[in-house]
């Protein structure tokens, strides 16, 4: 379309060709055959449905569309398999690296599991090739066509069958061609011109459109930028994910309670978990007369004396209990406690409240084999399966457990061993959450038996067993 | 479209190639020519005042769809606890409805693609209808997993989109992810197939349109189609290629949906029969739904000449075939449970048939296995009312099939975790609401788009039926 606003003179429209109408599909095929046989080359047929045989009559070339679809399908297949192998099988420290999932022991490049998605992408891209290829090969969408200006041609989508002989055809001569078309059975023949009049787009509409499109992109781009860069300010995101949570943190004010505190005091008449450990020998393995009782049991004792009537006393929480409430410094506390302790503070005898019996010994053996043997080994030599595996893998962070039969361990007072089980040492975590104090003492008891067994001589055996041993020799 | 639809002995313009009507009755009945077919189909979309039944149906369906929307809003605000899903039955109605609707969506592409490749001319009168049904069923299906993920604003996690914060990718060895690709591809390809098939008919509506807005809307939708031989040539090739691509696709979709179950270790689910059994069930339910929609529609919209009893008869036969396959699969499952000797598998099946939810199992068997067998009788296949009723039974039965499968979760390996599933009113409301959404979309389609593939029907009239009322034939006869 040319801009008619600049000139008042309508230019002479260019002739596009001659349009002939036919009665039905068979007449159309017959006529098309005659027209192409007569030497016309630029001939096009129009029909409301795909008339079978018209392509041969028009001597038209086959479409190359299948090749496009094939290439798209191949692309889909390759993209599918490459995408999955990269995203699920390749991992590194670069930007947008894949993530090497280990799922049910399948290999990183588990091709059978990748078949469904590869198949679907092959089909998807082939289908895009077929659909968009069809549009592209037909130069569609093309929302304006000069033929649509012909009233007669409007029937082409209902029951109209037409032939168009292009004016650019070498053999085209208007009068003769028209006569020829009538002679091959056309019911009507008319000329078609290029359309030169019409509405022109207002100037600058492209600029406006481009500006609006750019402006519409700004907000999503800004959101994307803020959500993928680091910032010291609160992040602006569409969905808050879990960045901001509706919760109170420790020592923050609250408008919810009358006293304005977010942290709540214990409810009247309740007893805090872990309190009431008055028997320091049993619960901490230290002597009651030790100076450090305050540090170990003092807080608890104070807490236990809280009767709930008066205001909450400021309680001094002992170091051992600190590890209870704050998970993080558990290791630090465990390391710190023995260092501050003097050997004389640890009990050297089993607590008086504990009944030493062979049942307790059996219990200790069972608990030791469950909780300790995995690393320390069934004999306590520091050769458990986990240790063997870690050393086999040459795990740099693994600290091999000290043999429980080493001089330094054998000479330790039982209270100190109890404390090690309770709070852990070096890489070993504390077991106070997993093993009850009685069971911990049972383990200590069994450990004594183990130590005895590993450092024993033949003289330790009872007389009858010694005789048996000598017969074996 | 049907390029290769030429009968062996077809000679253009020769009346001798017209089939004998008593041996092979014409697909299009009555004194119809190209124009009358166009008029009949376009009139539905052009009628300024649609039938009162349409308005009543639309208001009803749209309010149910609105209810679904409100319930989804409630779900998003509140959380998935509004459903009856629990620890044991972690997938409740959402997956039942998803599988049900995806299954419904199979008939459309089957009719469009597989029947096209097998040169079944009867598909031309019903394929548009069935394809539209496919699209709308897939829309309903896609809704359920979408809202089942809990925090729906993270639905994009389903797709392999690069994430600069998480450094994570989807897990491509999971059947649930395969589902995303299978259903996504199926929805896309079905939409392309449907839309491409509609382009020539949209051009017909454009050329008939009087109102400028209608002309412009149909003009844009028909992308400038003028029916030139070049356009038809490329279009026919593209259509045949799409059909060839959609054929394995339609079989793959429900196969992959069945992997959601079959790849798990659960008794009653962990079975290799699931893929073929699901595909047969999907086609079965899809044809059931096509009949449910088609029988009233041909009555109300005056399409009895175009969608004839012969078309209906063909669909009934497909229902017998697929219904029998489904029944055979039910028997095979029991046989394998017994023959496989796995006590958990045996328990799962005995529990299905005779456990606390026996009624669901026997509803399924009655509707899916017994009711379609009535189509063996000719008088049933000729009675639209009976066909309509049986098609409803098929729909009910296929919903219950998926429900029965999901209920396997009620009683798994550990009796301590056994728990009965009780749907909430939200569950039931969403099921009803999904039907509302489906029918809303369908009624809009009937109102504004060509519901019969006119250009394909015309091709069958010209090249297969050899209808003597056509202009060309009439000229040759004189």
Image (spheres, helix red, strand yellow):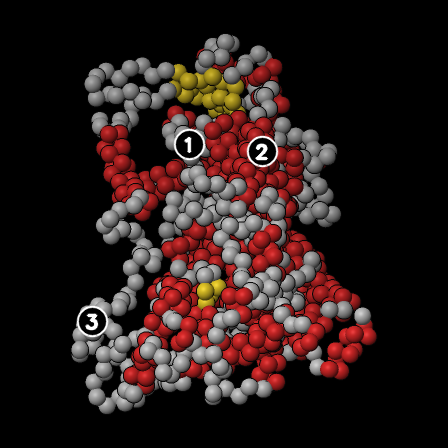
Give the x, y percent position of residue A84. 54, 43
* Mark 1, other Cα within 10 Å: few <14 / some 14–19 / many ≥20: some
Q: Looking at the rendering, which quadrant does residue A384 occupy?
A: bottom right
Chain letter of the residue carrying label 2: A
Q: Mark 2 points at which residue?
A: A74
Chain letter of the residue carrying label 1: A
User: Does residue B241 appear in the picture of this structure?
Assistant: yes
User: Does residue B46 appear in the picture of this structure?
Assistant: no
Are marks 2 and 1 in one subunit?
Answer: yes
Tell which of A430 and B315 is nearer to you: A430
Picture disc at residue A254 = 3
How many numbered discs sit on the rendered protein?
3
The residues bearing labels 2 and 1 have C-alpha atoms spaced at a distance of 26 Å
Picture disc at residue A141 = 1
Point out the tag, 2 or 1, that comes first from the N-terminus. 2
Give the x, y percent position of residue A287. 40, 81
Tell which of B359 and B383 is nearer to you: B359
Answer with left or right where residue A277 lies relative to residue A172. left
Answer with left or right where residue A427 lies relative to residue B283. left
Label 2 vs label 1, nearer the camera: 2
| Depicted A463 relative to depicted A326: above or below | below
The residues bearing labels 2 and 3 have C-alpha atoms spaced at a distance of 63 Å
Task: Describe the element under mark 1 as helix, strand or loop.
Answer: loop
Label 2 with label 1: CB-CB less than 8 Å: no
Give the x, y percent position of residue B368. 65, 66
């Amino acid at each position: 379309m040319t801009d008619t606003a600049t000139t008042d003179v309508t230019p002479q429209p260019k002739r596009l060709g001659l349009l002939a109408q036919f009665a039905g599909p068979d007449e159309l095929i017959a006529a098309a055959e005659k027209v192409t046989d007569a030497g016309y080359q630029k001939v096009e047929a129009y029909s409301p449905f795909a008339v079978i045989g018209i392509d041969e009559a028009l001597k038209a070339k086959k479409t190359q569309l299948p090749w496009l679809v094939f290439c798209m399908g191949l692309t889909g297949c390759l993209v599918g398999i490459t995408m999955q192998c990269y995203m699920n099988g390749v991992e590194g420290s670069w930007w947008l690296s894949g993530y090497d999932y280990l799922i049910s022991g399948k290999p990183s490049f588990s091709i059978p599991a990748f078949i469904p998605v590869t198949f679907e992408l092959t089909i998807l891209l082939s289908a895009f090739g077929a659909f968009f290829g069809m549009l592209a090969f037909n130069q569609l969408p093309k929302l304006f066509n000069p033929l649509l200006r012909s009233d007669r041609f409007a029937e082409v989508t209902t029951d109209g069958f037409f032939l168009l002989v292009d004016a650019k055809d070498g053999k085209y001569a208007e009068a003769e061609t028209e006569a020829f078309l009538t002679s091959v059975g056309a019911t009507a023949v008319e000329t078609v011109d290029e359309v030169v009049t019409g509405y022109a787009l207002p100037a600058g509409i492209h600029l406006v459109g481009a500006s609006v499109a750019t402006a519409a992109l700004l907000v999503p781009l800004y959101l994307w930028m803020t959500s993928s860069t680091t910032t010291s300010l609160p992040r602006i995101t569409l969905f808050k994910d879990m960045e901001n949570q509706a919760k109170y943190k420790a020592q923050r004010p609250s408008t919810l309670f009358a006293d304005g505190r977010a942290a709540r005091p214990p409810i009247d008449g309740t007893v805090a978990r872990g309190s009431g450990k008055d028997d320091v020998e049993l619960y901490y393995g230290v002597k009651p007369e030790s100076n450090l009782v305050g540090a170990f049991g003092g807080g608890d004792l104070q807490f236990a004396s809280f009767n709930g009537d008066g205001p909450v006393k400021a309680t001094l929480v002992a170091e051992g209990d600190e590890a209870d409430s704050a998970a993080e410094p558990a290791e630090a506390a465990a390391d710190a406690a023995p260092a501050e302790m003097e050997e004389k503070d640890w009990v050297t005898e089993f607590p008086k409240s504990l009944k030493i019996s062979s049942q307790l010994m059996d219990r200790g053996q069972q608990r030791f084999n469950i909780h300790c043997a995995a690393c320390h080994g069934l004999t306590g030599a520091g050769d458990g399966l986990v240790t063997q595996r870690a050393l086999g893998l040459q795990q740099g962070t693994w600290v091999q457990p000290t043999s429980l039969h080493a001089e330094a361990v054998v000479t330790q007072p039982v209270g100190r061993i109890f404390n090690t089980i309770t709070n852990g040492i070096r890489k070993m975590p504390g077991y106070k959450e997993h093993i009850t104090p009685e069971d911990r003492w049972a383990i200590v008891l069994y450990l004594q038996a183990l130590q005895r067994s590993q450092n024993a001589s033949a003289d330790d055996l009872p007389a009858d067993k010694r005789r048996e041993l000598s017969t074996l020799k | 479209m049907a390029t290769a639809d030429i009968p062996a002995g077809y000679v253009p313009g020769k009346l001798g190639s017209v089939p004998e009507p008593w041996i092979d009755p014409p697909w299009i009945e009555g004194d119809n020519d190209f124009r009358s077919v166009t008029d009949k189909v376009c009139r539905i979309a052009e009628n300024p005042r649609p039938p009162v039944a349409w308005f009543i149906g639309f208001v009803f369906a749209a309010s149910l769809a609105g209810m679904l929307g409100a319930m989804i809003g409630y779900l998003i605000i509140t959380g998935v606890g509004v459903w009856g899903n629990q620890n044991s039955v972690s997938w409740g109605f959402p997956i039942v409805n998803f599988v049900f609707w995806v299954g419904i969506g199979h008939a459309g592409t089957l009719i469009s693609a597989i029947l096209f490749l097998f040169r079944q001319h009867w598909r031309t009168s019903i394929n548009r209808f069935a394809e539209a049904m496919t699209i709308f069923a897939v829309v309903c299906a896609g809704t359920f997993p979408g809202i089942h993920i809990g925090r729906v604003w993270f639905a994009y996690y389903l797709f392999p989109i690069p994430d600069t914060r998480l450094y994570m990718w989807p897990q491509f060895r999971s059947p649930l992810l395969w589902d995303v690709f299978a259903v996504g591809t199926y929805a896309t390809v079905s939409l392309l197939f449907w839309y491409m098939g509609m382009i020539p008919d949209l051009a017909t509506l454009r050329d008939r349109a009087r109102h400028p807005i209608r002309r412009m809307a149909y003009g844009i939708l028909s992308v400038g189609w003028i029916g030139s031989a070049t356009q038809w040539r490329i279009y026919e090739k593209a259509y045949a290629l799409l059909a060839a691509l959609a054929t394995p696709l339609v079989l793959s979709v429900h196969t992959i949906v069945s992997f959601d179950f079959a790849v798990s270790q659960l008794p009653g689910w962990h079975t290799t029969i699931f893929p073929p059994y699901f595909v047969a069930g999907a086609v079965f339910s899809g044809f059931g739904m096509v009949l449910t929609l088609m029988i009233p529609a041909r009555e109300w919209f005056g399409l009895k000449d175009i969608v004839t009893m012969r078309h209906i008869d063909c669909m009934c036969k497909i229902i017998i075939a697929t219904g029998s396959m489904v029944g055979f699969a039910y028997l095979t499952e029991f046989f394998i449970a017994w023959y496989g000797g796995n006590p958990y598998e045996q328990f799962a099946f005995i529990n299905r048939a005779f456990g606390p939810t026996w009624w669901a199992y026997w509803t399924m068997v009655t509707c899916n296995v017994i009711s379609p067998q009535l189509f063996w009788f000719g008088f049933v296949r000729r009675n639209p009312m009976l066909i309509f009723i049986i098609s409803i039974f098929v729909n009910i039965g296929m919903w219950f099939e998926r429900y029965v499968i999901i209920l396997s979760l009620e009683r798994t390996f550990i009796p301590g975790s056994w728990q009965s599933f009780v749907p909430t009113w939200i569950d039931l409301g969403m099921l009803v609401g999904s039907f509302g959404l489906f029918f809303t979309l369908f009624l809009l389609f009937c109102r504004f788009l060509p519901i019969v593939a006119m250009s394909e029907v015309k091709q069958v009239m010209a090249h297969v039926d050899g209808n003597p009322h056509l202009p060309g034939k009439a000229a040759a006869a004189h």
